Image (tube, rainbow, N blue to C red):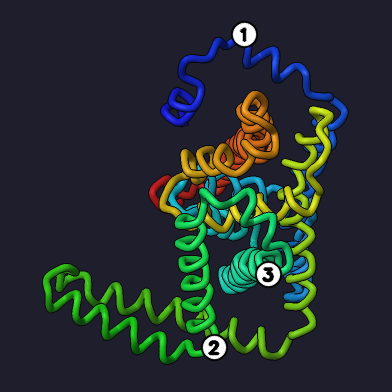
Amino acid sequence: MWLTYRLLFSGQEISEIAKDLQEADTAWLVLGLVLVFCFVAGESCIIHYTLRVCKQKVPFLSCLKYSFIGFFFSYITPSSSGGQPAQMYYMKKDGVKIGFSTLVMLLVTIAYKSILVILGLVLLIFNFDAVFTYGDRLGWLLTIGFVLNCAFIAGLAFVVTKPDWARRAGISILNKLTDWKIVKEKNHEKWVDKINRICDTYVIGSSYVKENAVVVAKVFGMTLIQRLCLFAVTWVVYKAYGLTGVSFLDIVTMQVMIAIAVEMLPLPGAAGATEASFILVFEKIFGEGLVKPALLLSRGLTFYAVLIVGGIVTLIAHLRVMRSDKRLNIPVEHR
């Protein structure tokens, strides 16, 4: 992150940047914070709803805690890979069975990624002029993003709809890796057990998805609203500078394209790629003079604010877990 901002703002005076930041209308930025909170709370609503459907009585505030923890770990790990394991860990500490938490996180992942790709394809088709006008310099990265996201969704769909096929494929690949000495022989059975556990969970998930189409549809609907809250923040920053001439739809379209382009990259918080893509896309919208302050405000609201609050929530939650484990005499190595 430090390197990214050093490169982006090299040769510029801090006083000039601070002056540009102060020109933004505070009222609009407060609205931006509200939208970001709605984005986080949106996932909390989904988690609360799906756990309730699974007959798991968890307070909404606990679900809000899981969301902040999930986003914190997602933002500090490559390809957002650490978020859901952390959420499942804290759900388990609150008494939610691992089978239910895995199913909930599976539904959240499917909806989160699918909505992004569906929304991206719809906007690409029906608002192609905006993509062509503002995203011409993002072409190759956008293509890679669509391919990676579609591959991820296809792989997830394969595992969910054909878990037994996925089990056989996984074990076959593991056998090859063991033959090639990439996986140690002594670890072979451990990995087989892990593949079986994952596929057993997805068997349950597959049955649930097939039998609860209405629930899945509601999760998709809530996810759409959740993601739109975040994508709208850049438009709020645009209005905070009193700018006009570019529609809400065009700005949201380009923010969706950036998300598709960078979310699957193996970078913690997509740091570097997000900022560079923002400059490439929104320079034509904000103008050369305001695009970097707009980047700081947009990224500050959608990334750093969530990272800071999520870090605080995670710290408090973990201190409580440690205190609880100590009271129950659970050794440290078992946590």
Binning the other alpha carbons within 10 Å of mark 1 as few (below 14), some (14 to 19) or many (20 upward) gives few
Q: Which residue is labeled 1 in the image?
A: 15
In the foreground, 59 or 114: 114
Image location of residue 287, percent across then percent down: 67, 31
Horizontal side, residue 266 vs residue 181: left or right: right
Asked if 138 appears above or below 14 in the picture, the reply is: below
Horizontal side, residue 98 vs residue 63: left or right: left
Q: Residue at x 77, y 35 (%)?
A: 238
Q: Which residue is labeled 3 in the image?
A: 125
Q: Which residue is labeled 2 in the image?
A: 161
Label 2 sits on what residue type? Thr
Question: Looking at the image, can residue 100 be seen?
Answer: no
User: Are the two marked residues, 2 and 3, in contact with CB atoms closer than 8 angstroms?
Assistant: no
| Residue 234: quarter of image | top right
| Residue 205: quarter of image | bottom right
Asked if 128 appears above or below 299 in the picture, the reply is: below
Considering only order in the chain, which callout, 2 or 1, is on the residue closer to the N terminus? 1
C-alpha distance separating marks 1 and 2: 56 Å
